[in-house]
Image: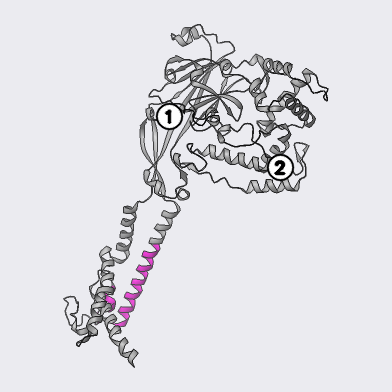
């Protein structure tokens, strides 16, 4: 009996609280459920209506939250007239399509010592040198296993690495680049170009923040990245090139000329890089159409996996600026190292991958890796060459293939699209510029790389909704379905805390809950519906 007596005042206070809340709340429709004089059919209809509205509001709320959580960013065009003066001029990598020059190869072969265990002539060694190209591209894998083994023995006998040999037999930048002009002024090519490694071997790079010096000396100063306010071919980069086709010995192309790769300053040229061919005795105009993608500072507060990008200073692999292409190359190099225990020759040293360079003896492993990666491996053979059956190696290969790179895009980036025009390179003496004076066009090609316009398109990645917009959306949803606002939440809090407490205190007094003044609307006491 004591428990019942204690519960009755509480129930009375709760009932009065619900009644007062229903009569005074700003939430639409609630007062009609508890209003005196309503028939049960009316109350039932209003209860169903309220439940439908609450369900609709919750559904819309969850839909909005799910959409925001799944894709919190959007891309908008900030400006179609962004000044190119604020855009870094692209890095330009120039690679001769020929990788081994006859005269340089002959000098190298003449200086090599032949092991006594091998019976090979100088001419035979000349024929073996092109096998080094297989280290740059698995697509050039051949079946000359015995030749690779002999060349590997010769190089090791002379303490030479494949990298050193390819650098020796390739074309130096000083011979490829005859004249250079930047912003209409002739400059020394050696001051603006540096030698670098790319997917085509050793090349010459302009305006690149990626070189070998800081890999060896981390304290070396970073190169200055060039920008230009000018557009049009006379005021961009102009280079007179000498491919030396008469000295060609081996390369992956059947034509002669220079490959021009255009990319971001923090990247190296890869197969994915936009490229243009500069043919022999042609003048090539490469128009660069930049587009900039910047991220709003508010995106830094969003988890990288949700915003799906990384800022430059968020590189998880080191202090250098983050780059998607570099991340992908590091991932590929790590997979190869896990399987083949060596560093790929055409992966730049700036990636920081330790270990020995992949030699000729690693070619079967490299070929198997790339074939598996592209899902084109023929079981037991690659282009007619038998592969060793090694269960341990197969397990490593499977593990490496299952490793996800997880490389995210760059939050801030510049994309460069190319438009190329080519014409015959002749009559340079008719151009009244110092750059063209006493210029011999025979056996040469001319390259112009320049911005096509004074403006560029600027895109901005931003949050779909910030906190204010999200709160406004929530308010709109609850107002649409229930006609309530933030004050409605205050009402709920007040009635079921402060008001309930007051009624419970009054219920414990002499007059019970009735001693607390009731909160009612000023309405007609007569039954509204008869």
Q: Is residue 375 left or right of residue 389?
A: left
Which type of secondary structure does the marked residue at label 2 adopt?
A: loop
What's the image's color scheme?
Answer: one colour
Q: Is residue 146 above or below residue 396?
A: above
Q: Quadrant of residue 491?
A: bottom left
For the N terminus, give its image quadrant.
bottom left
Q: Quadrant of residue 107?
A: top right
Judged left or right of residue 314, residue 492 is: left
Which sits earlier in the primary sequence, circle 1 or circle 2? 1
Magenta span:
30-59
Instruction: Determine the residue positioned at 32% across, 65% down.
Output: 481
Which residue shows up at 41% across the image and 54% down it?
A: 68
Q: Cβ–Cβ below 8 Å for labels 1 and 2?
A: no
Q: Say the numbered circle drawn on residue 88.
A: 1
Q: Position of residue 351 (x, y in %)?
A: 56, 35
272 and 506: which is toward the camera: 506
In reply to whether residue 307 is colored magenta, the answer given is: no
Q: Residue 178: which numbered mark, if any?
A: none
Counting other residues with Cα less than 10 Å from the Cα at mark 2, is it few (<14), some (14-19), or many (20 or more)? some
Foreground disc of the pair 1, 2: 1
Q: CA distance from mark 1 to mark 2?
A: 42 Å
Within the magenta stretch, is there residue 55?
Answer: yes
Q: Residues within 10 Å of mark 1 (few under 14, many from 20)?
A: some
The image shows residue 42 at horizontal and vertical percentages of 30, 78
Can residue 371 be seen in this snapshot?
Answer: no
**Residue 117 appears in the figure:** yes
Which SS type dominates the magenta stretch?
helix
Q: Is residue 378 left or right of residue 226?
A: right
Q: How many numbered circles does the render carry?
A: 2
Residue furthest toward the bottom? 1
**Residue closer to the observer: 343 or 470:** 343
Check disc 2 and report the residue beneath it.
Answer: 377
């Amino acid at each position: 009996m004591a428990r019942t007596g204690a519960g009755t005042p509480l129930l009375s206070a709760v009932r009065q609280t619900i009644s007062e809340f229903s009569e005074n709340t700003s939430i639409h429709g609630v007062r009609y459920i508890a209003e005196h004089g309503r028939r049960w059919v009316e109350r039932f209809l209003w209860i169903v209506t309220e439940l439908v509205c609450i369900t609709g509001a919750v559904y819309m709320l969850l839909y909005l939250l799910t959409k925001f959580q799944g894709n919190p960013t959007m891309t908008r065009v900030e400006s179609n007239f962004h000044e190119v003066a604020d855009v870094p001029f692209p890095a330009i990598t120039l690679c001769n399509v020929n990788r081994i020059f006859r005269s340089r190869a002959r000098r190298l072969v003449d200086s090599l010592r032949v092991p006594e265990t091998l019976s090979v002539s100088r001419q035979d060694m000349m024929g073996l040198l092109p096998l080094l190209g297989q280290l740059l591209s698995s697509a050039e894998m051949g079946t000359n296993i015995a030749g690779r083994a002999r060349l590997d023995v010769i190089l090791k006998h002379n303490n030479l690495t494949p990298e050193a040999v390819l650098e020796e037999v390739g074309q130096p930048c000083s011979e490829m680049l005859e004249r250079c002009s930047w912003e209409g002024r002739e400059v020394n090519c050696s001051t603006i170009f540096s030698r670098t490694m790319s997917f085509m071997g050793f090349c010459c790079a302009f305006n690149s923040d990626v070189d070998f010096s800081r890999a060896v000396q981390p304290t070396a100063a970073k190169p200055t990245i060039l920008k230009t306010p000018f557009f049009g071919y006379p005021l961009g980069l102009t280079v007179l090139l000498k491919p030396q086709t008469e000295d060609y010995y081996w390369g992956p192309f059947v034509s002669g000329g220079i490959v021009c790769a255009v990319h971001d300053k923090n990247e190296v040229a890869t197969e994915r890089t936009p490229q243009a061919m500069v043919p022999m005795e042609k003048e090539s105009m490469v128009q660069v159409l930049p587009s900039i993608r910047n991220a709003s500072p508010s995106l830094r507060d969003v988890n990288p996996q949700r915003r799906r990008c990384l800022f430059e200073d968020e590189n998880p692999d080191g202090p250098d600026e983050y780059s998607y292409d570099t991340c992908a190359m590091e991932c590929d190099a790590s997979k190869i190292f896990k399987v083949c225990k060596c560093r790929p020759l055409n992966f730049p040293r700036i990636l920081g991958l330790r270990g020995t360079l992949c030699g000729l003896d690693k070619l079967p492993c490299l070929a198997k890796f790339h074939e598996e990666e592209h899902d084109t491996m023929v079981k037991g053979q690659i282009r007619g060459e038998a592969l060793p059956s090694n269960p341990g190696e197969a397990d490593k290969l499977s593990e490496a293939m299952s490793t996800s790179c997880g490389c995210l895009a760059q939050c801030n980036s510049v994309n460069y699209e190319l438009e190329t025009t080519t014409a015959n390179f002749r009559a340079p003496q008719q151009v009244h510029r110092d750059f063209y004076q006493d210029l011999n066009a025979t056996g040469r090609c001319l390259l112009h790389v320049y911005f096509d316009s004074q403006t560029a398109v600027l895109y901005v990645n931003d949050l779909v909704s910030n906190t204010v917009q999200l709160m406004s959306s929530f308010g709109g949803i609850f107002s649409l379905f229930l006609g309530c606002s933030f004050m409605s939440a205050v009402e709920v809090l007040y009635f079921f805390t402060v008001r309930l407490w007051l009624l419970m205190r009054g219920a414990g007094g002499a007059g019970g809950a009735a001693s607390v003044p009731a909160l009612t609307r000023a309405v007609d006491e007569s039954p509204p519906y008869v």
